[in-house]
Image (cartoon, rainbow, N blue to C red):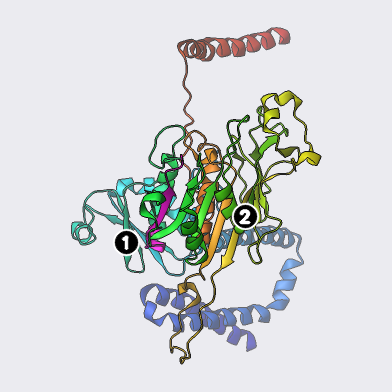
Amino acid sequence: MLKRVLGILSYVGMVLVFGALLVRVKYPDYDQYAIYAAWTGLGLVLLYTIGQWREIVAYFSQRNARYGALAGFGVIVVLGILIAANYLSTRRNTRWDLTANKQYSLSEQSVKLAQGLNSPVKFTLFDQPENFDRFRPRLDSYKYASSQVQVEYVDAVKNPMLATAQKVDTIPTVLIEYMGRTERVSTDSEQDLTNALIKLLNPTMRKVYFLSGHGEKDPGSNERTGYSGISDALKRDNYQFDKLVLAQTNEIPADATMLVVAGPRTDILEQELPILEEYLSKKTGKMLVMLDPSDNFKQPTHMPRLTGLLKEWGIDATESVVVDLSGRTQVATVPVSAPPYPSHAITKDFNLITMFPLARAVTPAKDAPAGRSGQSFIQTAQRSWGETNLASLEDPSKLTPEPEKGDVSGPVSIAVATAVPAPSPEKPDATPASNPPKPEDQAPKPETRVAAIGDSDFAANAYLGIEGNRDLFMNTVNWLSQQENLISIRPREAADRRITLTANSSSAMFWLTLFVIPAIVLGAGVFTWWRRR
């Protein structure tokens, strides 16, 4: 009697399971009831199986049954592994970029921006469907980096009204939307997409003024010593730039985010010094000073007013030239800095080599005013020093460090930064706001920030192609402007790996592939056949 009841229950269970499957496919509104029915059906089938335990044991006592059970168990294990692998690939997505230049991987800056998003960002590609695959790897990389990124593909030919509503005039166009703001990009370049994202995250345009009138580097010059490459990098990070002749204006413009003094040949004027002092101390200004050592070793150029101003902010720009005998370059006066760098926000996780054509030692001042202690963020190798006897540099073969004569012992610091919080204003008595701003909406507390680097040529057009020089300059600028979220390694264009063959090389490859290699294979075969005979 019990077996008959269990048999009926087993049929009821199977009906419930298949019925639940049918309900989930045809009537998704009743999905919850289908789940209950499926579990009930599985329970009834399991109950019937337990009721047949004697027959099951008797069956598996036979030899063929045991072999069949082992084979079935193996099939179940393989299916389990496949199901687990499929689940992991769906829930735990992992990608590997095996290309030599990581052309399918986002740069550190792009990943950092994507992972720091507090609100959703939507990338919408307007193009023809046959061109979607060209953009898909790049857009999917942003989506993979952050759950806040959404990607949509729109056929602009079949949906012209939508394209017109979004002011899409040409295809392809990637529309990027963030918190009601939009940017449009017409390429799949990571540099362009990330720059657009930077503009959305930092809609306020910042202004960088390059001090002029003392022989400084020209931000608009395309010459080897010019700064046009740096100017382009500033634009990509949403900065504007202009030149400032302080002797004419007698003031630093109110819209100045920072002031850059790039390699002056002469000292600042006496009437300019109080303007700079007021800008830093009373207006929480930001200033980057890049001081080259004298290129005339017989008649060194002294800048007491500018170096004195730096010393007031905890930075000592020594009258020396860094000599590097670590073997990284063939020229002793071309120091190279490599990871690990001194601990600082500018060089955090910075793993690129930087090179400085001719640098002076810039160290934290020992007698710095209270609260204005500088911190080094670039230093050279152990086998280096700051040579104070510049006349000895004319014969590099006889160079030796002489600390007793004032030489700076290695490793030598060539860049120092100082951050001083602005004085806290007195808080008026007031009731707290009912809706205080969120932490991510609050601007960072203003600070006076000063950075000095003992070389300006490292950021010139001639040396900007060195691996880390551009990123080092831009990281320093972003730290000074208190935009730490932009401090990272930036996107780079894909390397050109085309092989260019000469006429002789082409001819050699032709004869090698069509005649030499086949002849060798044929000869080896004939030789093997002859030996076997």
284 in the magenta segment: no
Q: Position of residue 83 (x, y in %)?
A: 58, 61
Viewer-nearest residue: 147 or 240: 240
Q: Position of residue 122 (x, y in %)?
A: 37, 62
SS category of the residue bearing label 2: helix
Quadrant for residue 162, please give it.
bottom left
Badge 1: residue crowd in 10 Å (few <14, some 14–19, many ≥20): some
203 in the magenta segment: yes
Viewer-nearest residue: 409 or 495: 409
- Marks 2,1: beta carbons within 8 A: no
Q: Give amino acid for label 2.
A: Lys
Residue holding disc 1:
182
Label placed on residue 311: 2
All told, the count of numbered labels is 2
For the magenta stretch, what is the residue range? Answer: 199-216
The CA distance from mark 2 to mark 1 is 45 Å
Quadrant for residue 410, please give it.
top right
Residue at 42 percent of width and 43 percent of height: 213
SS category of the residue bearing label 1: strand
> Would you say residue 486 is visible in this rendering?
no
Is 469 placed left or right of 154 in the picture? right
Q: Give amino acid for label 1.
A: Thr
Q: Position of residue 493 (x, y in %)?
A: 45, 40
